[in-house]
Image (cartoon, coloured by chain):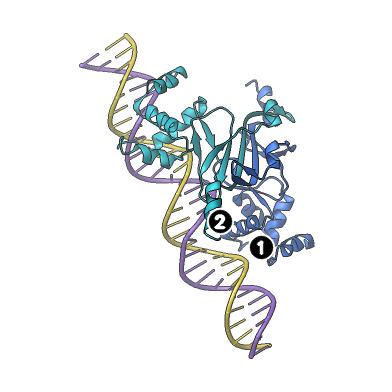
Chain colours: A cyan, B blue, C yellow, D purple
Amino acid sequence: MKLIQDKLESKGLRSSQQRMKILQYLDQHRTHPTVEEIYNGLVKEMPTLSRTTIYNTLQLFLEHALISGLTISGSESRFDFETTPHSHFFCKECGVVMDVEKVDCPCENRGVISGNRIDEVHLYLKGVCKNCLTKSKGGKK
Amino acid sequence: MKLIQDKLESKGLRSSQQRMKILQYLDQHRTHPTVEEIYNGLVKEMPTLSRTTIYNTLQLFLEHALISGLTISGSESRFDFETTPHSHFFCKECGVVMDVEKVDCPCENRGVISGNRIDEVHLYLKGVCKNCLTKSKGGKK
DNA sequence: TTTCATGCTTGTAATTATTACATCTTCGTG
DNA sequence: CACGAAGATGTAATAATTACAAGCATGAAA
């Protein structure tokens, strides 16, 4: 928890209870949770926690590059404690989002493509995960 | 228009007015439009067009691989007439989504990663486009 | 050609994710 | 202790999407 606090303060951010808990939650749940999942995970121990606080806080963390954001599954945003470049896999069957081995893309080495400045590179793979594949095979379907 | 109709029927889909117009719109507007943009673009000449029809139709097109979908800009889905693999760039300033030269990723050659079946590969680049870069430079900001 | 079934389209209402905003709280400083 | 700024909260508003019930159109069968 001390580490979490340090991480916040190293970016010049005040370390409130809420901020620490939210960041800690992301650290302990590397499942790329949505706002709703974070809320449900924390509201038990912080009954007054507000969704708005989570939105604000995540936005703040993003701006200070403490976390990273994903828009892999259409309707909602997901968040990741990990900020170093890596790729994500989304299972169209069960909806799980997992990290996959870093694929080395030539493009990432270049800061500019056709005059456009590149700040972020997101590689999203979509398909059916190992688990669902075996399941549907076993289920004869 | 005949080509559009053929394209639909080649997938075994009935070619209704709505379906043809929607597909044609995507063909003629390679700007990765949202549902709202498609609706606004077509409602003038088809006053009874419903947003629900657009949602349904795009869903159908996606299932038959007639078009492809993007979730690059967070809140809304965008659609692309182009289905061959290519990459997209999103400008955080002006919100434009443009195609960029295809980056050759090693991963695309493999159908499976760690036992997961890969059906789609999306490479999203985010940053500031050429246009906005010059603008903000000129504007001394 | 009428009849009918089926698939397509429509519009409204409901749901979900997100943002706006006004208010209340907390905390460090003087 | 008192003040002021930053932080947190809750409600209401908005935006994107889905659910669903009902109307419409079209092509095959009679």
| Residue B137 vertical placement versus A136 (above, below) | above
Q: Which residue lies furthest to the right in this view?
A: B2
Residue D1 in picture, x, y percent from top left:
20, 16
Q: Tell me, for residue B18, which label it has, or none.
A: 1
Depth check: give the residue in front, B106 or B10. Answer: B106
Q: What residue type is labelled 1?
A: Gln
Residue C6, quarter of the rendered image? bottom right
Q: Residue furthest front?
A: A138
Q: What element carries label 2?
A: helix
Q: Could you tell me which quadrant the C terminus of chain A lies in? A: bottom right
Residue B62 in picture, x, y percent from top left:
64, 55
Residue density around tag 1, few if under 14, some if 14–19, many if 20 or more, within 10 Å: some
User: What is the number of callouts on the image?
Assistant: 2
Which of label 2 and label 1 is nearer to you?
2
| Residue C3 vertical placement versus B94 (above, below) | below
Q: Is residue A13 visible?
A: no
Chain letter for mark 2, please.
Answer: A
Depth check: give the residue in front, A22 or B78. Answer: A22
Q: What residue type is labelled 2?
A: Lys
Residue B126, quarter of the rendered image? top right
Q: How far apart are marks 2 and 1 (CA)?
A: 38 Å
Disc 2 marks which residue?
A137
Left or right: residue B117 versus residue C26 is right
Left or right: residue A86 versus residue D3 is right
Residue drawn at (41%, 21%) of the image: A3
Chain letter for mark 1, please.
Answer: B
Q: Is disc 1 on the same chain as disc 2?
A: no
Q: What element carries label 1?
A: helix
Left or right: residue A45 versus residue B55 is left
Residue B14 in picture, x, y percent from top left:
68, 67
Q: Can residue B69 be seen in this view?
A: yes
